[in-house]
Each structure stands twice: as C-alpha cells, then as structure tokens.
Amino acid sequence: MMDMYLIILVAILGMILFYGLIAYFLVRFISKKAFKLTLTKYEMMEIMTWLAVLFITFMMIKTSSMNLLLPVVVLIIPLINLRRSNRKQREMN
C-alpha cells in the first residue's frame, strides 16, 4: 500500500517539475522573442508564481470550490517577497 502512495507522490512531483521547467523556458522564450527583453531570475519566478495563482484561481472558479483558497493565499506570500527582491535588485543595478 505504501509503495502505491510513493509512486503517486513521485509522479505528482515529477509532473510539477516538468511543467515548471516548461513554463520557465516558455516565459523566457516569449520575453526574448516577443518583447526583446531579458528577464532576471527574480522576474521569471515572479511571473511563474503569478501564472500559478491565476491557474489555481481559475480552477477554484471552475469547480466552485473554496478548497483551493489556501494554495492561493500561500502563493501570494512569496509574491510579496519576490516583489521586494525585484525592487532591491533594480535599485542595485
């Protein structure tokens, strides 16, 4: 029984990693080609976190469930920290 849960956990973590990498390179590619802009790693992480918040909010509305409210709130905390880091990074440059 535990083997099944371990396989499911590894599969879910693998999917998160895979889709995270796809999102990272896709956002970087679009910013370079469409906007002629090279983003810093802080800006990339901020964009990816905003995309995650939007996706979870969309799923929350689609399923009309408040169960996904906690992940949205948990993702907003890193967004605040990333905004501060981006501001500090821009001030240093």
Image: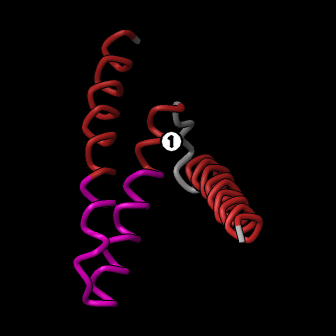
Q: At 33% across and 89% down in the image, what residue appears?
A: 62
Magenta-colored stretch includes residue 63: yes
Image point (57%, 56%), residue name = 34
- Dividing the image into 4 quarters, which one contains the C terminus? top left
Amino acid type of the residue that numbered disc 1 sits on in the rendered structure: Met
Q: Is residue 46 magenta?
A: no
Is 92 displayed left or right of 30 in the figure? left
User: Could you tell me which secondary element the residue under label 1 belongs to?
Assistant: helix
The region drawn magenta spans 48-73
* Residue 18 found in image quarter: bottom right
Q: Nearer the viewer, residue 41 or 77?
A: 77
Task: In the rendered view, tell whether residue 25 sits above or below residue 16.
Answer: above
Q: Which residue is mark 1?
A: 44
78 or 70: nearer the viewer: 70
User: Which of the 4 image quarters holds residue 15?
Assistant: bottom right
- In the image, residue 90 sits, relative to residue 54, either above or below, namely above
